[in-house]
Image (cartoon, rainbow, N blue to C red):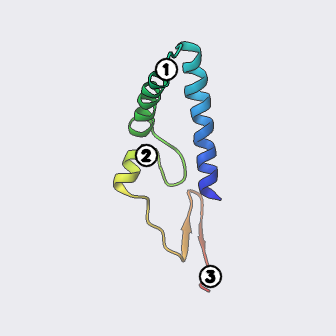
Amino acid sequence: MQSNCILERFRHTLLDEHFRVEGRRTWFESIEEMQAVLNEYLEGYNTKRPHQGRGMNGRTPIRAVTEGMPKTTNTEVTSQTKTVRLKAA
């Protein structure tokens, strides 16, 4: 379920920040032109733009992939405001 939410958010981001904006700015003559502009957007999205999603802590997606996600244990979940201890099954 979590991954579907992430994909839906990404789809809306692409629509709102790229396609609607670029579609008004540029008249594309071919799919290849559109793909080239999309590739430029995704390069910036993945390498330059900090993200605030779960476990990202303001990192770019490329940094999250290369550095790995924060490690958690199955007995403790920590948030910014509180720590919750889970019972072992």
Considering only order in the chain, which callout, 1 or 2, is on the residue closer to the N terminus? Answer: 1
Which residue sits at x=47%, y=29%?
38
Which residue sits at x=50%, y=55%?
55
**Pointer 2 and pointer 1: residues touching (CB < 8 Å)?**
no
Which label sits on residue 62? none
Considering only order in the chain, which callout, 1 or 3, is on the residue closer to the N terminus? Answer: 1
Under circle 3, the secondary element is loop
Please name whichever residue, 4 or 31, is drawn nearer the observer in this view of the structure: 31
Please name whichever residue, 63 or 21, is drawn nearer the observer in this view of the structure: 21
Q: Residue furthest front?
A: 30
**Mark 1 crowd level (few <14, some 14–19, many ≥20, 10 Å Cα):** few
Relative to 38, residue 50 above or below = below
Q: Is residue 85 left or right of residue 32?
A: right
Q: Position of residue 58 (x, y in %)?
A: 46, 44
Relative to 51, residue 5 above or below = below
Quarter that holds the N terminus: bottom right
Please name whichever residue, 54 or 3, is drawn nearer the observer in this view of the structure: 3
Which label sits on residue 30? 1
Tag 3 residue? 87
